[in-house]
Image (tube, rainbow, N blue to C red):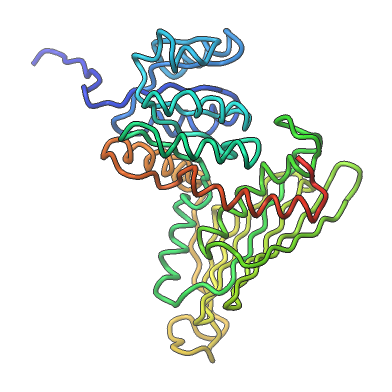
């Protein structure tokens, strides 16, 4: 038999990426390259050399230093969907121009620099041509280890408390056009933490927030979300660690406790006196481990969120992480800003 060459199928979705920076190179591009039925065809970056290098590295046919070429320029004919990883203002600019043209867009969080801009984008999302998908990239709830936690807890009642800790080494100076470190921190980690809590518990009846100044550049912000039926979410974000630290604790009304440390270790426990106690009695715990070398992009959620976006386009279904769902995240963060002095 003579040798055969595998060529992209006609059903492949053609992707362009805008902003092939560190985050895209380390997470989004590897995850996209492994996505079945996806083909990277174009790259846009501010620096021509960065765009050309990313195109060569990831096998794209086209590159440009002007992202509008991929929306309404000569490169748009070869694009079905865009992946955007840049500033909130860039995300908003791309969404504003791409959605009315029927180009589906995956944007990293946060999707907009402020609530008013987001409201206008939600209108663009609603009025976009049928089959056009807008998707906001919150990777934490898509992580395989987090989904294992949620799937396990569903058999043990409903959630009563959510406790999330996200601290990092940055930002220690304003980024993304923000006026303060506090607002930069809220846009970076705060959107993640609040989104995770709202996905689990819904819109809170009361928001309380306090800020602690660690030094002249480092902050800790604690957020309490209260619900009329007694449920609580407690969120801690900060920029005083030497690396990203992520911990999530969920407790059900059957007193089953699930704790996820970073993306690697899941522990489950329940007091022996709790109703229905059985396999998780007394001081015993059930532990799951995900070694860092195994399934990294699925474990952290990057491949899973892109797969969800991809499937929504393929099957003309609704987005699993739409712009409209971010409005409540922004509302909560606006209340936090008022209470902590973290002005945008």
Q: Identify which residue is drawn at 41% across, 70% down.
A: 154
Point 56% across, 48% down: residue? 327
Q: Is residue 17 left or right of residue 339?
A: left
Instruction: Indicate left or right for 40 with 233 as reference.
Output: left
> x, y percentage for residue 57?
47, 16
Q: Is residue 92 above or below residue 225?
A: above
Quarter of the image that includes the C terminus: top right
Total residue callouts: 0
Asked whether 244 or 41 is in front, the reply is 41
Vertically, is 275 above or below 162? below
Question: In the rendered view of the protein, which quadrant contains the N terminus?
Answer: top left
Could you tell me residue 10's position as x and y percent?
Answer: 21, 22
- State the image coordinates of residue 43 (x, y, percent, origin top left): 47, 16
Q: Quadrant of residue 134?
A: top left
Depicted 255 relative to depicted 240: above or below: below
Q: Identify which residue, 98 or 146, lies in the foreground.
A: 98
């Amino acid at each position: 038999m003579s040798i055969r060459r595998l060529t992209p199928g006609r059903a492949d979705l053609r992707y362009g990426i805008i902003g092939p920076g560190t985050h895209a190179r380390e997470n989004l591009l590897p995850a996209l390259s492994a996505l079945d039925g996806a083909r990277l065809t174009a790259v846009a970056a501010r620096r021509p050399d960065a765009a050309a290098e990313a195109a060569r590295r990831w096998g794209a046919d086209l590159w440009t230093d002007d992202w509008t070429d991929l929306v309404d320029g000569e490169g748009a004919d070869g694009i079905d969907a865009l992946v955007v990883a840049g500033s909130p203002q860039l995300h908003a600019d791309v969404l504003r121009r791409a959605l009315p043209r029927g180009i589906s867009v995956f944007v990293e969080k946060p999707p907009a620099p402020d609530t008013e801009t987001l409201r206008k984008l939600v209108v663009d999302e609603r009025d976009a041509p049928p089959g056009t998908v807008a998707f906001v990239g919150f990777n934490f709830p898509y992580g395989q280890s987090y989904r294992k936690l949620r799937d396990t807890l569903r058999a043990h009642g409903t959630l009563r408390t959510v406790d999330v800790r996200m601290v990092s080494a940055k930002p220690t100076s304003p980024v993304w056009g923000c006026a303060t470190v506090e607002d930069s921190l809220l846009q970076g980690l705060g959107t993640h933490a609040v989104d995770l809590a709202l996905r689990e518990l819904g819109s809170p009846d009361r928001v309380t927030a306090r800020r602690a100044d660690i030094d002249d550049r480092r902050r800790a912000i604690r957020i309490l979300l209260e619900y009329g039926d007694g449920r609580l979410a407690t969120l801690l974000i900060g920029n005083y660690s030497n690396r990203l630290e992520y911990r999530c604790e969920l407790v059900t009304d059957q007193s089953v406790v699930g704790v996820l440390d970073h993306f690697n270790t899941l522990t489950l426990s329940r007091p022996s006196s709790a109703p229905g106690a059985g396999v998780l009695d007394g001081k015993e715990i059930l532990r799951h481990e995900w070694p860092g070398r195994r399934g990294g992009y699925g474990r952290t959620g990057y491949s899973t969120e892109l797969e969800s976006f991809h499937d929504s386009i393929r099957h003309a279904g609704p987005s699993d992480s739409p712009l409209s769902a971010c409005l409540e995240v922004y509302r909560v963060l606006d209340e936090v800003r008022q209470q902590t002095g973290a002005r945008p």
